[in-house]
Image (spheres, rainbow, N blue to C red):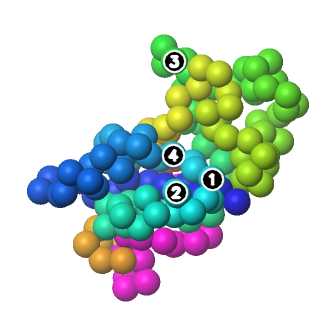
Amino acid sequence: MAFAVIFIRGTINSKRGVADTLAMLNLHKKQHCTVIPDTPAYRGMLQKVKDYVTWGEISPEMLARLILERGRLEGGAKVTEDYIKEKTKYTSVLSFAKAVVNGDEKIIGVPGMKPVFRLSPPRKGLRSVKRPFNDKGDLGYRGKEIDKLLERML
């Protein structure tokens, strides 16, 4: 299983540990997204920054779309289907995305591809960046609902 993590709240007046953890997750600016595996170390990092990010289990179809639409190579070129075929052992972006979601591969397994996806602010906005998702907000764990937010941000 893999989590999509989106940075949605700024770090002004936050503790240094929070900013360091966000940097370790490759989240340097708001509206940035990264895909991480589900491990105890990453879960601890997510708990530390839960007041600044939202995360959930991403579907392989959404990950493939995210890679094709927002994936960038070093130098700014877009990631294409042919590039994934050439640089990995997978025959398509969807098969690569399924491997990432299942935990067999990592996003950084593609040489030259940036580990962060730059997104637009969500259409129709966010509900609240001060409240958790279960309490009519947008922060913290949201499960499968992450796909709906990513759809609005693409």
Q: Nearer the viewer, residue 43 or 52?
A: 43
Spot occupied by residue 99 in the image (x, y as percentages of width and height) = 79, 46
Instruction: First in sequence, mark 2 or 4: give its number.
Output: 4
What element does badge 1 sit on? strand
Q: Does the CB distance between marks 1 and 3 fall below 8 Å?
A: no
**Residue numbers of the magenta segment:** 133-150
Q: Which residue is mark 1?
A: 37
Indicate the amino acid at tag 3.
Glu
Secondary structure predominantly adopted by residues drawn in magenta = helix
Q: Does the CB distance between marks 1 and 2 fall below 8 Å?
A: yes
Instruction: First in sequence, mark 2 or 3: give its number.
Output: 2
Q: Which residue is mark 3?
A: 74
Quadrant in which residue 51 is drawn? bottom left
Indicate the amino acid at tag 4.
Thr
Instruction: State the separation of the CA atoms marked 1 and 4.
Output: 10 Å
Instruction: State the separation of the CA atoms marked 2 and 3.
Output: 25 Å
Quadrant in which residue 40 is drawn? bottom right
Spot occupied by residue 64 in the image (x, y as percentages of width and height) = 70, 43
Q: Which residue is mark 4?
A: 34
* Foreground tag (1 vs 3): 1
Crowd class of label 1 (few under 14; some 14 to 19; many from 20; radius 10 Å): many
Instruction: First in sequence, mark 1 or 3: give its number.
Output: 1
Crowd class of label 2 (few under 14; some 14 to 19; many from 20; radius 10 Å): some
What element does badge 3 sit on? loop
